[in-house]
Image: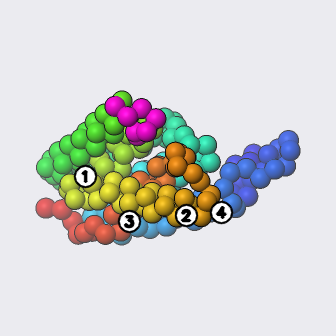
Amino acid sequence: MAALLPSGRCGWCRQRIGARPYLLELCIAVAATIVVLAAPTIPVLLAGLWWAGCAVPLVFIDTRVHRLPDVLTMPAAAGVLALLTVDAAVGDRWDHLLSAAVCAAVTTAVFVSMGLLLGSRGMGLGDAKLTLSATALLGWWGWGAAFGAVFLGFLGAGFVGVALLASGRVHRGTHIPMGPFFIAGTVVMLALVDGTPAK
């Protein structure tokens, strides 16, 4: 049980497990605060909080082991779409749901195609599943918000990649996990969207 605490250690070897103590909890708190300020309705708020709860741990997982496990990416997408459907039904905002669904479908299709065409040089299926939930959530606000997050993800990864190359910490061809950058881009866009109730 001690391993589940923020400062948890392995019960056998006593080595620290996971991220630095309380860093994960701090990141979730920041993301949740941004969601609360951005969300104009209760179902959208719940969708954002659900996404944050699933996505923020993926930052640490992908950074450490270069994996975006289905056990988090798929529930994130299912929960976001389900809660946005509730919002559409309750508030007659079907146009917002359609925007979210189209953004998610287009982005996921592009990412999967890149992975199939480019192989290891393209996007992994984990990245596609992650962006499914992220662009669905931001797609509620429109295409600009959804694709802005993807753009910021690529931009951030590019800057970090150049910095790591310049410092000699990585070499050409080194794989940089993209999940943390797409998640950060999504959080930034949530901080920028209009939080007033949708019509």
The secondary structure type at the circle numbered 3 is helix
Q: Which numbered disc, 4 or 2, marks the residue that appears first in the sequence?
A: 4
- Residue type (three-letter) at the residue carrying disc 4: Tyr
Find residue 64 and report its horizontal and vertical position in percent: 62, 48
Magenta region includes residue 165: no
Residue 44's image quarter? bottom left
- Residue type (three-letter) at the residue carrying disc 1: Gly
The secondary structure type at the circle numbered 4 is loop
Viewer can see residue 15: yes
Which residue is under mark 2? Answer: 166
- Split into 4 quadrants, where in the image is the C terminus? bottom left
| Residue 55 falls left or right of residue 131 | right
Above or below 137: residue 109: above
Which residue is under mark 3? Answer: 188
| Viewer-side residue, 31 vs 112 | 112
Find residue 38 and report its horizontal and vertical position in percent: 32, 66
- Residue type (three-letter) at the residue carrying disc 2: Ala
Which residue is under mark 4? Answer: 22
The secondary structure type at the circle numbered 2 is helix
Find residue 139 and report its horizontal and vertical position in percent: 25, 52
Find residue 66 and report its horizontal and vertical position in percent: 56, 43
Label 4 CA crowd tier, 10 Å (few <14, some 14–19, many 20+): few
- Residue type (three-letter) at the residue carrying disc 3: Val
